[in-house]
Amino acid sequence: MEDNVKKIMHVMRRAPHGSIYTYEGLEMILIMAAYEQDLSIAFIGDGVYALKKNQNTEGISMKGFAKTFMALDGYDVEKLYVDRVSLAERGLTEDDLLVDVELLDSAEIGRRMSEQDVVIHH
Amino acid sequence: MNIGILLKEGPYNHQAADTAYKFAEAAIKKGHTVDAVFLYNDGVINATNLTDPPQDDRNIAARWSNMAKEHGVEILACIAASKRRGITDDIMIEGGSITGLGTLTDIAIRNDRLLTFGD
């Protein structure tokens, strides 16, 4: 079994609403989490908005799913990486995020990306 | 090398479906094994047999179907993504089938590479 554990990184690159990529990406992560692989999620660019506190989707008739990111911990998905520059460029700080994350420089995210067996962008 | 493909865009609207196909075709020609093409997001629309493009255009759905038949490549549409988009067994291309995200995880685990095509 050990040999079959793969390092799989999901890369969130888009705002949570406006397209379905982030939501269906999250659905994929929740299923993969059941397979006991070495999962991580990197939030870069507008992807950092997925973790922002106080989202209200009532006006756009969309189901809010920000809180699902808070549940990832329970699925043993604990490696959440946020690009420091992407966050700062959007006027956000770690305090604006729903979950505990690792703030990393782009180069470090790139380094961890290069260590993966599989990278899936959303 | 054993290769899995994840295709995240629908046909015609985006080049990803063409690039994924061309890649798979080239890989097979080079002697690699393309295990499966997993369709996700709008990618599931690649698997409907209802498309009817003009005669002088490529038929993307038929191309995938032929690849499945000739080279044993599994063409798999995610069930959750398919349900949202009206893709069912009744309109599935020959050689294609509907499956769950667990299958994608298996594809990622059992192949040397998983390549993702999409925006």
Image (cartoon, coloured by chain):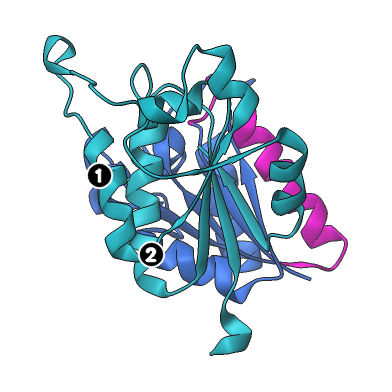
Q: Which chain is cyan?
A: A
Residue A92 appears in the figure: yes
Where, by quadrant of the figure, is residue B32 drawn?
bottom right
Q: Disc 2 residue type?
A: Ala
Residue B39 is situated, as x and y percent measured from the top left of the image, at 46, 47
Q: Residues within 10 Å of mark 2 (few under 14, many from 20)?
A: many
Q: Disc 1 residue type?
A: Thr
- Which chain hosts label 2? A
Which label belongs to residue A68?
1
Residue at horizontal 18 percent and vertical 18 percent from the top: A56
Q: In what element is the residue under mark 2?
A: helix
Q: Which residues are magenta?
A: B10-33
Q: Is residue B36 above or below residue B7?
A: below
Residue that badge 2 annotates: A33
Specify whether A15 is left or right of A45: left
Residue B7 is situated, as x and y percent measured from the top left of the image, at 55, 43
